Image (tube, rainbow, N blue to C red):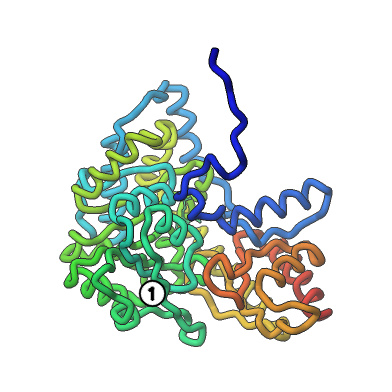
Amino acid sequence: MATTTQVQPGSALTERIDRIEISATLAVVNEADKLRLSGIDLVDFGAGEPHFSTPQHIKDAAIAAINGNFTKYTPVAGTAELRDAIVHRHAVDFGSDYRRQEVIASTGGKHALFNAIQVLVDHGDEVIFPVPYWVSFKDIVCYAGGNCVCIETSEKKDFALTAEMIERAITPRTKVIILNSPCNPSGAVMDPDDMKEIVRMAASRGIWVISDECYVYLNFTGKRFSAGSLSEYRDRLVIIGSLSKTYAMTGWRLGYALAPAQIVSAMQKLQSQSTSNATSIVQKAAVAALTGPQNCVEDMRQEYIRLRDQVVKGLNSISGLHCIRPEGAFYAYPNVSAFFGRKNLDSAGQVAERLLQEAHVVTVPGEGFGTREHIRVSYATSPAELERGLERMRSFFAAL
Ligand SMILES: Cc1ncc(COP(=O)(O)O)c(C=O)c1O
């Protein structure tokens, strides 16, 4: 007769799962949820998602898909209709010329990024990316067995990244460079010329560039730019895109990668052994988003610009806080180091924790993004809620 044995804690887990941590942003959400459940009224600047509802025509397309019984498996990389819609949207907005075989739809941009890194990064390969970085870059690379090479940037220079800075970090083991513009968490936007130079330099050395462009439509400079428009370097480029932020669709989970057909085909192989296809109904909604009216995207961008101005003004009016003006995404990244040494505070993590426990404002500490002097403030919320949170922060910091 079969017997079951008690698994000892820790003994069942693989070495690779122990290499990674739960996303710092999700950890904050969990802690905030606990306080909320105990009845505390929080102001939430932690969430990395739009406060807008998904536009109605996108929701309607999903409802029609359900009612039309579009509820079966689809091809792994997505329906031909969706792949063509992604390629078409990118061509219209950025002047690129990808083909259907060069795109794969996945369950969110994070999934597309995960797949891309798993197919490109081997044990011991080095992956370069700048600090501050989006939390998941580090853990996804570690999970693949790669070594992260983080490049410091300067807040005084608006966290700018240049080809020379990257060139200094390149070794014979460098396999991939990850770019993220607009950046989560700093909101920094790369100068298109710097990006072109990095992509050119990388291609000339046979190094891959993964350009995470999940916030590409939330660019406030008026010079929206995708590395995918650099067709001469396309054989070393992977573009990661997402509908999450662009169309306020975070929960729908639809992202994509644009890449050489050989890479797409390897990602397809991996995806075929895990999630198979993105949800059929969501694929129909995504087609409606990408081919339907685009004024919703511009309307949301304009609102984020107004909110950005409000939050930067508010944060900089708090004595001791310093916040650069982000040029994209929906995050402000104020420096809180002036408060270190006061009331036993000496890290961003402690500032964020005390802000949560004492002022009931949720922010994300910079440590998860590779810097210990900042907190991330997501301003994707209403102007009134933003003001309410700023007021709480003002009182909190004034009392330190
Ligand atoms: C820089 C960056 N890349 C990718 C993603 C993934 O977004 P999603 O998986 O919702 O498409 C996020 C989400 O916060 C992000 O901030």
Residue 106 in the image: state x and y as whole percent: 38, 43
- Closest to the observer, 288 or 143: 143
Q: Quadrant of the N terminus?
A: top right
In this picture, residue 292 sits left or right of residue 332: left
Which residue is painted at 54% across and 55% down in the image? 21
Q: Nearer the viewer, residue 73 or 87?
A: 73
Residue 18, above or below 313: above
Choose top left, top right, bottom left or bottom right for residue 163. Answer: bottom left
Q: Amino acid at mark 1?
A: Met
Residue at 32% in and 61% down: 124
Instruction: Please provide percent x and percent y for residue 294.
Output: 41, 52
Question: Residue at (61%, 38%) from the top-left corner?
Answer: 8
Quadrant location, the C terminus: bottom right
**Image x and y of residue 397, in percent:** 77, 78
Query: Residue 356 or 80: which is nearer the viewer?
Result: 356
97 shown above or below 200:
above
225 is higher (above) or lower (below) than 197: above
Q: Nearer the viewer, residue 92 or 229?
A: 229
- Image position of 233 (left or right of 138): left
* Quarter of the figure with residue 368: bottom right
Q: For the residue labelled by badge 1, is the local secondary structure a helix, a strand or a loop?
A: loop
Query: How many C-alpha atoms fall within 10 Å of the one at disc 1: few (<14), some, or many (≥20)?
Result: many
| Label 1 beta carbon within 8 A of ligand 1 | no
Q: How many marks?
A: 1
Q: State which quadrant residue 121 falls in.
A: bottom left
Residue at 83% from the left image edge and 79% from the top image edge = 399
Residue 357 x %, y %: 79, 63
User: Residue beneath label 1, please?
Assistant: 190
169 sits to left or right of 348:
left
